[in-house]
Amino acid sequence: MTNPNNAGSGTIHQARFVDPRGPAIATLRLLRDDGRLYADARDPGLDRDTALAMHRSMVFIRLLDERMLAAQRQGRISFYLQSLGEEAEAVASAAALDPADMIMAQYREQGALHYRGFTLEQFMNQLFSNERDLGKGRQMPVHYGSKALNFMTISSPLATQIPQAAGYAYAQRLAGEAALTLCYFGEGAASEGDFHAGLNMAAVLRAPVIFFCRNNGYAISTPASEQFLGDGIASRAAGYGISAIRVDGADALAVYEATRLARARIMDQPQPILIEAISYRLGAHSSSDDPSGYRSREEEEHWRRRDPLARFRLWLQHQGWLDDAEDNRETDRLRQQILAALKQAEPLPKPPLESLISDVYASPPVRLEQQLAALREQVLRYPEHYVATAGRLKK
């Protein structure tokens, strides 16, 4: 006889409470700090070309972050978010996916987008919101999106992408697609109601989705210890009937292997899986944040010694796949290319005013046409306050 409550059928005859202080979920780690595999670790079989592409994306994002944070400080862009210390999570997980898989990101996964083929020019055009920006200047900096690369445009509100990922993945299943959805979010976003709704929906509908939580220890300035008492985020999966794995987010090989295995399980039998990557945000939450107000230099230095890029570089050298001299030359080339692309993108005109209401509806409704006309009149009346736009409008 089936249980209408869909809960455990075992019975007891003396009161017994479940103890939440059970054993903690273990963390998968394959690489030691010296870049060598642990003796009992299984080599994930990462091929040379994929490994070097991962390394290039991690280096590129670190250099881009460095340059564009400086550009924000100079007043050249309005806002920026670094992924310093978390590059392995995004890049290695993206490398384990199929290009047809949809990615729904939060806002610190630019490495996944670069690995998929987003160009340096596309990054710069979005950051400067110029006329070549795929988003037509409608989004804040670092809110990337690419239909061609199956990378859903990023939204500012936390956790909106989690139920969206459940729904999109369910649609993939209904359509019979050999693809899944990977949804990134931080442990702070897991405190939002959308997290619980999204996971429950995905579990009940057996949606082919990987929920990838970047547990970097802080939701802006709030430490994890003040966010929840349970064993991280992975422990929540069981309550929804979802499989989970915890992985060292600073270990590119471990992240790749966990994501690869999760994808294989989902392709074999549609289901959601939760991956919790334990890492640390070495930079500020954003260009609007000062982490010195809520954490110590000693804490930061402790995690800096576990730099994911340095560890992965050591592994590549042990494999004989990376030469120090060539790596340094390539890093210098990338740094120069990023600076050149910045100088090219910055002076380009902003998108035309009309693009504000294009590509939203097949035909813009009357109310939007009226609002656009009112905005155009405002710009022409006070051109000194709309320098970037006024020069492109005709009276």
Image (spheres, rainbow, N blue to C red):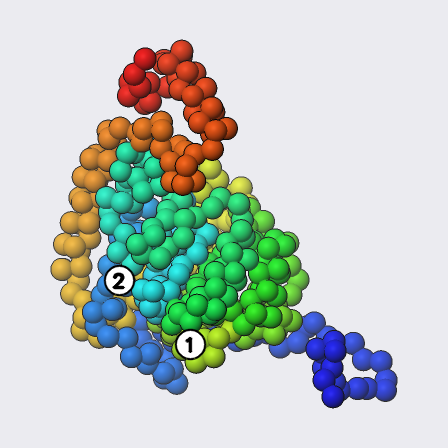
Q: Earlier in the sequence, mark 2 or mark 1?
A: 2
Tell me the quarter of the picture where residue 308 sits.
Answer: bottom left
Instruction: Please state which of the two labelled residues, at mark 2 or mark 1, is closer to the viewer.
Output: 1
> Which residue type does callout 2 highlight?
His
Q: Quadrant of the C terminus?
A: top left
Q: Which residue is mark 1?
A: 267
Q: Quadrant of the N terminus?
A: bottom right
Residue 373 percent location from the top left of the image: 42, 21
Tell me the quarter of the picture where residue 125 sits.
Answer: top left
Q: Is residue 172 above or below residue 145?
A: below
Q: Could you tell me if residue 77 is visible in this image?
A: no
Which residue corresponds to the image point at 36% horizontal and 83% vertical from the top-left?
42
* In the image: residue 39, left or right of residue 365: left
Q: Residues within 10 Å of mark 1 (few under 14, many from 20)?
A: some
Distance CA(mark 2)–CA(mark 1): 27 Å
- SS of the residue under disc 2: helix
* In the image: residue 183, left or right of residue 311: right
Residue 327 percent location from the top left of the image: 18, 59
Residue 193 percent location from the top left of the image: 63, 54
Q: Which residue is mark 2?
A: 55
Which residue corresponds to the image point at 44% horizontal and 56% vertical from the top-left?
104
Which residue corresponds to the image point at 41% horizontal and 16% vertical from the top-left?
377
> Which residue type does callout 1 highlight?
Met
